[in-house]
Image: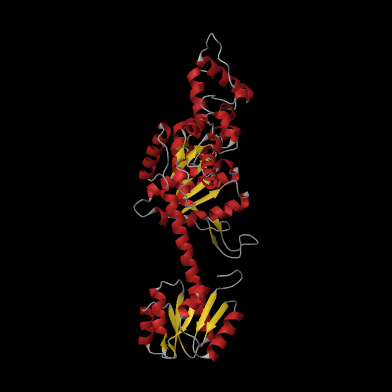
């Protein structure tokens, strides 16, 4: 289908008048039209090269049978829909056409409006079929992805996520830095909840709470009734209704405005929604998974997040650890992405990593987490020709993070000849970070490049509070 065109139609009929009449009408209606009314030998090759959406094919083409042409189209698996044209209004003729693979048939003389309707319906069904095939492909890729890693933290995360999915918990909170894979965990849980029915068939709808203004976010979540506001010309279902029996992912819920938080809390408690401008309570059956890279307990203390909503979300919570806290997983993920992108870009030239490159990757801090690692591997697969990746093939900013160095040279701590207590150094650095951030644990954790939970553990361990 070309830009601005409704679709491509190829006319095959030995009646010049019919071809001319249909051609003019369909062109005027916005279709691209080609035709043949004289030379029918090799006709399948002729229109196959033009790649039409629909072929209108007469049953009688002089000495040639249109049904034989239809059979050739199907035998050669030509990607087009066929509508047979016939002067015989016998039902058996129509049945025979359909059995041979025709999408429909039209009886002469034509009702031109009927022709338009038949063509329009077939093209629309084809468009929808292509969209469904595309989405099935997307969903099959998304939902066969597992949580990759063999670190203790990831193993525990997988185990707890599986338990939550098996129990079909209705509300879940997933925390973690940007790029760690919080949405992946959400999809993993969704897949586990709907494994029997096939997760690709059950709705999974994600919405970013920071991407839309508050008014638009509310209408997207809850929908609206006709006339609720100026542009509400018709009723519209919200995401909660569209995700019925499935999962809704509220990404970065920590940035949701307080006024909308109260409405969300009501939905979670009552399991029903009310559209904007509406009075009817609409029951919903949906799993709500919220993600955030913020410390919600701290946001509650500041008054930025409702305490009751936090308690409701935090009953079942999972934390996605940053990649720097599970260095060995970086190598496992690198191998996984190497295979993934080699398949995607149809290349097998990059086969692995040298021991030196593995050391660099293990020692690098990965501030962008798994998302950064994925981008690095994709770039290597596309641009590098070497079979074995060495440190020279990695981004320059990674070279200062090798395991041998531990830190970039400018930031290295020089161990005194007399030695020093690691616990004393660790405690002192934590206290410095807390002082620099006015005891904001979230910011202090970022300064120390550890997770918030790890910092809390260390603070408790050293009795700093």
Task: Indicate the position of residue 406 as horizontal and vertical percent values.
Answer: 53, 24
Does 414 sit left or right of 84 as displayed? right
Does 73 sit left or right of 396 as displayed? left
Q: In which quarter of the image is residue 163?
A: top left
* Residue ID at (57%, 31%): 399
Question: In this view of the protein, which residue sits in the foreground, 167 or 360?
Answer: 360
State whether residue 364 is above or below residue 425.
below
State whether residue 120 is above or below residue 184.
below
Task: Indicate the position of residue 47 as horizontal and vertical percent values.
Answer: 50, 77
Q: How many labels does the image show?
A: 0
State whether residue 312 is above or below residue 26.
above
Question: In this view of the protein, which residue sits in the foreground, 21 or 400?
Answer: 400
Name, please, the residue furthest toward the front. Answer: 386
Considering the image in quadrants, where does the C terminus appear? top right
> Is residue 80 visible to the viewer in this orientation of the structure?
yes
> Is residue 270 visible to the viewer in this orientation of the structure?
no
Question: In this view of the protein, which residue sits in the foreground, 359 or 180?
Answer: 359
Question: In this view of the protein, which residue sits in the foreground, 333 or 278?
Answer: 333
Q: What is the basis of the colouring in this image?
A: secondary structure
* Residue ID at (54%, 31%): 365
Task: Indicate the position of residue 266 as horizontal and vertical percent values.
Answer: 51, 47
Task: Indicate the position of residue 160 as horizontal and vertical percent values.
Answer: 39, 38
Name, please, the residue furthest toward the top. Answer: 418
* Residue ID at (63%, 50%): 213
Considering the image in quadrants, where does the N terminus appear? bottom right
Name, please, the residue furthest toward the left. Answer: 196
* Residue ID at (50%, 22%): 458
């Amino acid at each position: 289908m070309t830009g601005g065109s409704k679709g491509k139609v190829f006319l095959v009929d030995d009646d010049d008048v019919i071809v001319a009449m249909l051609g003019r009408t369909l062109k005027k209606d916005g279709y691209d039209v080609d035709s043949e009314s004289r030379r029918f030998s090799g006709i399948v090759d002729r229109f196959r090269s033009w790649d039409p959406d629909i072929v209108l094919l007469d049953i009688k083409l002089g000495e040639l049978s249109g049904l034989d042409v239809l059979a050739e189209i199907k035998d050669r698996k030509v990607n087009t829909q066929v509508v047979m044209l016939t002067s015989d209004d016998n039902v058996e003729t129509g049945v025979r056409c359909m059995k041979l693979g025709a999408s429909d048939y039209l009886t002469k003389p034509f009702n031109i409006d009927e022709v338009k309707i038949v063509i329009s319906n077939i093209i629309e069904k084809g468009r929808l079929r292509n969209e469904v095939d595309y989405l099935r492909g997307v969903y099959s890729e998304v939902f066969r992805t597992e949580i990759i890693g063999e670190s203790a933290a990831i193993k525990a995360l997988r185990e707890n996520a599986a338990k939550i999915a098996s129990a079909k918990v209705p509300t879940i909170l997933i925390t973690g830095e940007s790029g760690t894979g919080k949405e992946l965990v959400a999809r993993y849980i969704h897949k586990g909840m709907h494994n029997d029915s096939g997760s690709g068939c059950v709705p999974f709808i994600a919405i970013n709470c920071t991407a839309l203004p508050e008014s638009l976010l509310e209408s997207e979540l809850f929908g609206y009734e006709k006339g609720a506001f100026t542009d509400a010309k018709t009723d519209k279902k919200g995401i909660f209704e569209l995700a019925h029996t499935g999962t809704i992912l509220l990404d970065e819920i920590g940035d949701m405005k307080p006024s909308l938080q109260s409405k969300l809390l009501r939905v979670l408690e009552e399991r029903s929604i009310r559209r904007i401008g509406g009075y009817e309570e609409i029951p919903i059956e949906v799993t709500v998974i919220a993600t955030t890279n913020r410390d919600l307990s701290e946001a509650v203390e500041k008054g930025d997040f409702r305490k009751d909503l936090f308690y409701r979300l935090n009953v079942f919570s999972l934390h996605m650890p940053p990649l720097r806290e599970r260095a060995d997983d970086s190598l496992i993920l690198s191998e996984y992405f190497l295979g993934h992108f080699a398949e995607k870009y149809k290349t097998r030239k990059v086969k692995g990593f040298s021991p030196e490159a593995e050391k660099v990757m293990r020692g690098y801090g990965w501030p962008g987490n798994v998302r950064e690692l994925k981008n690095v591997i994709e770039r290597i697969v596309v641009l590098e020709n070497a079979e074995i990746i060495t440190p020279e093939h990695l981004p320059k900013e990674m070279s200062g993070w090798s395991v041998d160095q531990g830190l970039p040279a400018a930031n290295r701590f020089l161990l005194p000849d007399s030695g020093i207590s690691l616990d004393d150094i660790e405690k002192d650095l934590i206290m410095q970070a807390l002082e620099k951030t006015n005891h904001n644990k979230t910011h202090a954790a970022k300064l120390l490049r550890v997770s918030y939970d790890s910092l809390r553990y260390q603070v408790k361990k050293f009795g700093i509070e």
